[in-house]
Structures are given as C-alpha cells and as structure tokens.
Amino acid sequence: MPVHPIPIPTDECVNVLKVTSFMPSPLHRHLRAIGRKAAALGLAATVALGAAQTAKAADDTITFGAALSLTGKVATEGVQVQKGYDYYVEHINAAGGIKLGDRRMKVAIKYYDDQSDAATSAKLYERLINEDGIKLLLGPYSSGITSAVSAVTEKYHLPLVVAHAAAPSLYERGFRYLFAVLTPLEQYTSNFILMAAEKKATRIAIINENDLLPRQAAEGAARQAAAAKLDVVYTATYPTGTKDFSSMLDVLRSKAPDVLIFCGYTGDTITIRKQMGEQGLNVKMMGVILGPTLPGFVETLGPLAEGILEPVQWTPQDPVKDQFFGWTATQFAEIYKKETGYEPDYHPPQSAAALEVFQAAIEKTGSLDPEKLRDAIAATDIETFYGKIRFNEKGQNIAKAMSVVQSQGGKPIDVYPPAPGTGTFMFPMAAH
C-alpha cells in the first residue's frame, strides 16, 4: 500500500516528501513509524522506504517524480491527483511491475508538496532532476503550475506526461517533451453551449478567476457562445483569493441570464454558489469547470448543488477496456470503490493514465533513456480504463471526448451527450 505523506522540514518550506512503492502491510506500518520518528527529530531525509530502497533502486525499481498541490488553494484537486498515481503504483506492482527488456521492474514515486505555487513547483522539479537524479517526471496539478514546470523539463530535454493541465497556450509553445493525457480545454465548455442552445436558452453570463486555466476556459466559452449566436450578457474576471462575490452577483441579477458558466477552482465554485443561495439568485442552468464530482462538493453545498453541471474527462460508463490491466472503466470504478471506500471521479483514472503512457513507452523501447522514451510517447496509441490516448504534434490527446455530469439527488449523473445508460438533463435547475 502507498506510504502516506510525512511532514519534513526543508529550507524550501516543502512539507511533503514521499516515495511510494509496493510492500507488505506490516512493513508498511513499521516504516511509517520510523518515518514519523525521523521527521520528529528534524532529519532532512526521505521517508524510511526511500532510504531502504535507495541502494537497490537502480536494480529493481523505476522511480518517477512529481510535485503536487497537497496543500494550498488547489489541494482538494491535488490530493485526488496523488490518489490516482498511487493507485497505479499499487496495482502495477501487484501485477509484477513494468516490463523492461527481460526484467520486471517495480515502480516508486517520489513526491514533494508545491503548496499550490508555480514558482515552488518549478524549484522542486529542478530538485527532482538535479539532486534526486529522477528523469521520469509526472505532471503537477493545474495549467498555471504546469506552465512553469514544463519550462524546466523542456530545458533538460526530459519528457513530462501531465494529467491535469488543459490550457491551450501550454501546447502552443513548440515544446517537444510535454504530453497531456486529458482532453483539450476547448471541450470543457463546448457541451454547455450545445446544451443551452438545445434548451432555447439565449442569455449567457461567464465569470472566471484570473488564472491561466479559468481565464482560457472563459475565453473559449465566449467564443463558442458567439458562434452559436447566443447573447453573452455579462462577463467578469475576479482576482485569485476573492471571498466576496456580492458585487458581481448584483450585476448578474440585473442582467437576468438564463445560463451561468463559472470558471474557477472548487473552493471558489462552492463560495459563489452559497452566496447565490443567500441572495436568492437563480439561473436556469449553471455549468462549472470543477464541481459535483469532487469529494465534499455536494456534501458542502447540500441542496444548492442540485442541478450544477460539470464537464468530465471520464465516467464509469465510458466504453473502453484497458490493455494493461484488462479492466473496463466500470470495472476500474468498482475495484477502486471496493478498495478505497468511495467512488472515483475522473482525477484518479486520469492520473493513472499518465503512468500507463510511460509504461507503454518503456515496454516498447526496453529503455529508460529520456530521448527514446520521448519519441515512443509521441507515437502513443493505447486504450486504457481512462480512455484512448493518442497525441497530436502539440502533445495533446486527440483520441477522446468529454461528457457532462449533473448533480441530481446528491450524486453526479452522466447526462450529456445523450446515450444509452445516461440520465436526463434537468432544465431548468432547481430554484432556491
């Protein structure tokens, strides 16, 4: 089972450093106890498993590296990213590991906490590369942080496979070593516009955080609405850290939109929806780029979550079958829930897919050489329990589409595009 993060003091204010690997539970518990004691003594060292594995890592373990937002403003999402990485590690190791030539290699991941800060994350990837000697790198969370990190990995000519960075500008820089398993950002809001048009909704309002992904998502939504000949009656951008949306909501009420598209991270989505409820402000349709599938979202909002729409990269109903584990999307979800106790949103399978891209490249080349892996990754054409993955010349996955879920009865229900097994789009959403 994965080793959980242990606070470790460093001169860079990094409070999580972890190596994940496969081992028996008794040893797991013993090593965690050792790690806690080491941390309490203020030792600048890896957790016990990292120390135990260091001497033989080159012989039987492939070690990946990542800095994730385990604290800070996007920690809700960052923790889900880590869960997906760890889940892959546990299961690939239980299956014998990654095939490297005629050997089977176990997998480990060294983590740092970037505290949701791009500059910190870039420094940590420098540390992973230059101090830890790790050349196989997984992406952080968010487009803004990935922008800084990918500049580092590009400088060192090291492939970076990201699972959670969709902003189009990332893939317009001519980078050769950046690859993304998720669907491009244009699809995040395009279904919202189609759904609104089909329901004869004509007045659209768009609010976004002044951060890379939310800003570009909002710009895309405005272009899509104009192309569909819908009337964008209000747009607003708010600074990161905003806690009071009342002035925006006052203007929103005066514009009387049918549809609100909100482009911000989970905490902000919860805050603005609560304030809409407090003011009795209702719209017929509300689409958000992050929401009902995230743990705690529905529980925090209660009835106010009802009817909120979210684009998702993956649902358990996706008609795919993994070529490495043999699981369908439904089977993955069932196994994940049985082992972790809760149903996965799209973040864990999306994270796991990034590691499967590396696995396919390693097994194809029989090598860990970064240049050979880069070329093999560029030629990826695989099917996973997350979906199909095939990259264009920019490093974007062009092999899969997105769905839309709606919070109904306290659960996210797949409602669009309409297909056998999906629910019915509730329009208008419930008034409060």
Image (cartoon, rainbow, N blue to C red):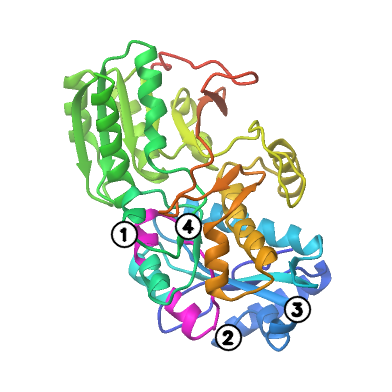
Which residue is labeled 3 in the image? 60
Q: Closer to the camera: disc 4 or disc 3?
A: 4
Give the image location of residue 130, x and y in percent: 47, 84
Q: Nearer the viewer, residue 322 or 213?
A: 322
Q: Would you say the residues marked 1 and 3 are in contact, meaning their CB atoms lie under 8 Å apart? A: no
The residue range painted magenta reads 125-148
**3D distance between C-alphas at marks 2 and 4:** 31 Å
Amino acid type indicated by mark 3:
Asp
Give the image location of residue 354, x and y in percent: 57, 56
Amino acid type indicated by mark 4:
Phe
Q: Nearer the viewer, residue 424 or 392?
A: 392
Q: In this view, does 96 lie to the left or right of 7?
A: right
Which residue is labeled 1 in the image? 173
**3D distance between C-alphas at marks 1 and 3:** 37 Å
Which residue is labeled 4 in the image? 179
Residue 26 is marked as none
